[in-house]
Each structure stands twice: as C-alpha cells, then as structure tokens.
Amino acid sequence: MKHRFKGAFLGIIGFCIFTYCVWLMMTFETANGQGLLVPVQPQETVPNNTGIQCVWSSLELIGNFIEEPRLYNLTRNPRCQGMSSASGVSSLLNSMNIKFVQTRNKTEGLKIMKAAMEAGIPVLCGFNGSHAINVVHYDSTANRVHYIDNIGNRKPKIMSLDRFNKAWDGWIVAIYPVKQTKIRRLLAERKIEMWYYDPSSSL
C-alpha cells in the first residue's frame, strides 16, 4: 500500500513539474514577442504610469509598432492625461488625420481582430468597460489570446478565448499603417496580402 501511495505521489509531483515546465516554456516564448502574430518588442510597449491612461498607452504602443510618428509619446500629450472612450479616441485620431476603424460590436470587432492579426498589426481592446489592453495574438484553434497589459511588467500574457470573450466588452480600435516597411516584411514572411478592412460596416 505504501509503495502504491508513493508511486501515486511521485506521479502527481511529476505531472506538476511537467505542467510548470510547459507554462515556463510558453512564458519564455512570449516574453520577447517570439512566435506571436504581432511580435511587439519590449521597447515598443508603453507604461500606464498614472493608472488612468490605459487607452492612450495602448494607442501609443500601436503607433510605436506601426511606426506612426503622430502617435509617438502620446501619453505626454496634454489631451491624453486622463481616461478616455471611443468618442475621445475618434476625436483625437480624426484631429490628427489618422485613418482608423473602431467598433463596439463583437461580431464586427472579431472581423477586425482577425484581419489585423493576420496583417501583423496590434489592436486596442476594451476590458469590462473600465480598462484597455493590446491584443497581439488571436488563435481560435489553440483557444488562446496573447495580450499586453499597460499595467505591470508589460510582457505578453496568455488568456483562454473563453476568458477573453467574457472580459472583452466589444470595443476594438485598429489603425491603418502609413509607413508599411515593418508590416510588409511581416506579410512577406507569411506570404499574405496587406489587409484593408472596410470600415463602412462597423458601428
């Protein structure tokens, strides 16, 4: 009986170690943006230092990645020192003459999400109506989403699709890149064409 108990105990310990190793490998894979549809680098992430600039931090990250200079240092802009919403984002981006698409409709949002991920472009997503993060990988087959939170260490984290769909409030913002050097290289590596989502159908 003791041997049986010892064998079962060792089996449980072995499974725990294996699970931890798998988790560790997944964490290492995402820590530097490797293997992601949108390989955002640590220097392109933007901290939400005030705790209320999550929208602007998320937009600045997108600007850094797609090399859109009008969005550089956005969190230092006097207009971007507080909380924001879809209307605030529209007002700012329109004033900068930046082409973008956004919606609060999950069906339309999912189309934008998939198109942007395939094209290698990060998006802003609203969480629970009170926070904004960047999605950098969406994989329905593997049932996971990789995202970057502007609070904390800003390393890509993994969330199941079920959990993501519960937290995602439907808000998504995607910005069309003007300078497409990096995007075109990513697309060339994947052998797919540049995306152009038709914003006329979004809400």
Image (cartoon, rainbow, N blue to C red):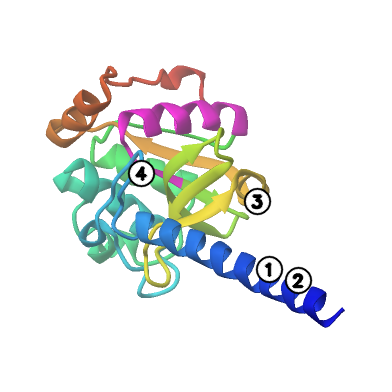
Disc 4 to disc 3, C-alpha distance: 19 Å
Residue at disc 1, secondary structure: helix
Q: Which of the two discs, 3 and 1, sits closer to the camera?
A: 1
Tell me whether circle 2 and circle 1 mark residues in contact (CB < 8 Å): yes
Which residue: 55% across, 45% down? 144
Say what amino acid the circle numbered 4 marks. Leu
Q: Residues within 10 Å of mark 3 (few under 14, many from 20)?
A: few
Residue annotated with mark 1: 11
Residue at disc 4, secondary structure: loop
- Reading the chain from its start, which is encountered first: label 1 or label 4? 1
Residue at disc 2, secondary structure: helix
Which residue: 35% across, 74% down? 49
* Residue 203 in view (yes/no): no
- The span shown in magenta is 106-124
- Reading the chain from its start, which is encountered first: label 3 or label 1? 1
**Residue 94: x percent and y percent?**
31, 37
Is residue 198 on the magenta stretch?
A: no
Say what amino acid the circle numbered 3 marks. Arg
Q: Residues within 10 Å of mark 1 (few under 14, many from 20)?
A: few
**Majority SS type along the magenta span:** helix
Which residue: 51% across, 18% down? 201
Disc 2 to disc 3, C-alpha distance: 32 Å
- Reading the chain from its start, which is encountered first: label 2 or label 4? 2
Residue at disc 3, secondary structure: helix
